[in-house]
Image (tube, rainbow, N blue to C red):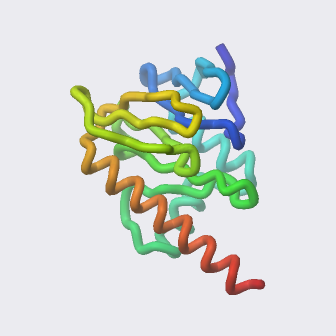
Amino acid sequence: MLEEYEINSSTLAIIPIDDSSSRVYEEETEYIVNKSVHKIMDYNCKFYGSSYQGRCEGTKYLTGIKSKFPIIVEESRNLIFFPTNSIRNLDNAWISLNKIKDYKPSFAGATIEFINQQQVEVPISFYSLENQYCRAVLLKAKLYDLKSIKK
């Protein structure tokens, strides 16, 4: 069991096990981390030079989204993640936008298929997942627009 986890370009999803531990899926492996999903995200925002609150404010500024913010964890590697629920919800998971191949409804919510064919089921309706995915795509588009303006 890990005490800390650094999100990287292989990270697929961070799923809660309970209120104090999480399962992190990577392309080739998975880890159990002795921290809540929110604490892992907060640590990584700080690790990459901001804060969770700062990332949320950046998303709100760029997109106008007012809740359940997708965030840019690390800009140069396009590490963009979106939540499946409110951060106050114990079922909230964080999903890497750029690693999703497909998603579909399932009995317990929605199933996400990643680019490595791995599948993870999350307790969120298909329509809510689609909305969160679209919000993250909007954030990514706004980020690319800003980058192209600066060139």
Give me the residue at 36% from left, 33% from top.
111
Pick whichever, 53 or 48, lies toward us.
48
Give me the residue at 38% from left, 42% from top.
103
What is the x, y in percent for residue 49? 74, 55
Pick whichever, 80 or 89, lies toward us.
80
Left-right relation of 73 to 142: right
Left-right relation of 109 to 28: left
Pick whichever, 148 or 123, lies toward us.
148
What is the x, y in percent for residue 80? 58, 53
Give me the residue at 74% from left, 84% from top.
150
**What quarter of the picture does the N terminus occupy?**
top right
Left-right relation of 38 to 144: left
Above or below for 28 versus 40: above
What is the x, y in percent for residue 122? 36, 32
Q: Residue furthest top?
A: 1
What is the x, y in percent for residue 50? 68, 57
Give me the residue at 34% from left, 37% from top.
89
Number of marks present in the image shown: 0
